[in-house]
C-alpha cells in the first residue's frame, strides 16, 4: 500500500493489514497506519478499511496523550463559528 499524504502535508505510513470481524461476524481486513503527533512528534496508529477512498481516520493529528477533549473541540468550533459570523458582519457593513 502507498503512504497517504493529507492536504496539510502530514504523512500516514502503512504498517500492515490485520484480520477483523465485523459486528455481523463476517470477516474482513483493516489497514493499520502510523503518523506523528503534531504536539510531541510521538507515533500513533489509526485503522481504515482496505477499500477506503477518504477516511476520517487520516484527520487525526494527535497521539492519545494529546487528543483534544470533547469540551476543547466544542470550544474551538464555537470560536471558529463566532469568528466567521463577525467576519461576515464586518464585510456586509461596507
Image (cartoon, helix red, strand yellow):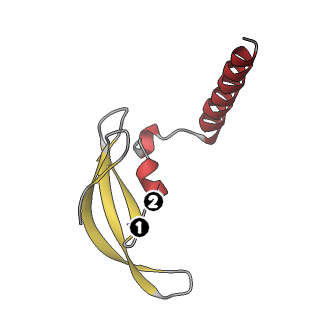
- At 41% from the left and 42% from the top, the residue drawn is 61
Q: Furthest-front residue in view?
A: 94
Give neighbour class at mark 1: few <14, some 14-19, many 20+ (Cα, 10 Å).
few
Which quadrant is the N terminus positioned in?
Answer: bottom left
Give residue 40's quadrant in the image.
top left
Q: Check residue 71 in the rendering and tell me which mark sits there, or answer none.
A: none
Q: Are marks 2 and 1 in contact (CB under 8 Å)?
A: yes
Residue 55 on image: x %, y %: 45, 59
Q: Check residue 55 in the rendering and tell me which mark sits there, or answer none.
A: 2
- At 62% from the left and 41% from the top, the residue drawn is 70
Q: Is residue 13 above or below residue 10?
A: below
Give residue 29's quadrant in the image.
bottom left
Q: Could you tell whether 44 is left or right of 22 in the image?
A: left
Name the residue nearer the viewer: 7 or 50. Answer: 7
Name the residue nearer the viewer: 50 or 64. Answer: 50
Q: Is residue 80 above or below residue 68?
A: above
The residue carrying mark 1 is 52
Give neighbour class at mark 2: few <14, some 14-19, many 20+ (Cα, 10 Å).
few
Residue 68 on image: x %, y %: 53, 38
- At 69% from the left and 17% from the top, the residue drawn is 91
Give SS at disc 2.
loop
- At 31% from the left and 40% from the top, the residue drawn is 9
Amino acid at each position: 500500500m502507498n503512504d497517504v499524504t493529507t492536504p496539510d502535508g502530514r504523512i500516514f505510513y502503512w504498517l500492515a493489514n490485520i484480520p477483523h470481524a465485523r459486528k455481523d461476524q463476517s470477516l474482513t481486513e483493516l489497514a493499520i497506519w502510523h503518523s506523528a503527533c503534531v504536539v510531541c512528534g510521538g507515533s500513533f496508529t489509526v485503522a481504515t478499511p482496505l477499500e477506503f477512498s477518504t477516511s476520517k481516520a487520516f484527520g487525526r493529528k494527535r497521539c492519545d496523550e494529546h487528543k483534544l477533549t470533547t469540551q476543547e473541540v466544542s470550544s474551538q468550533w464555537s470560536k471558529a463559528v463566532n469568528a466567521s459570523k463577525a467576519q461576515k458582519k464586518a464585510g456586509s457593513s461596507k
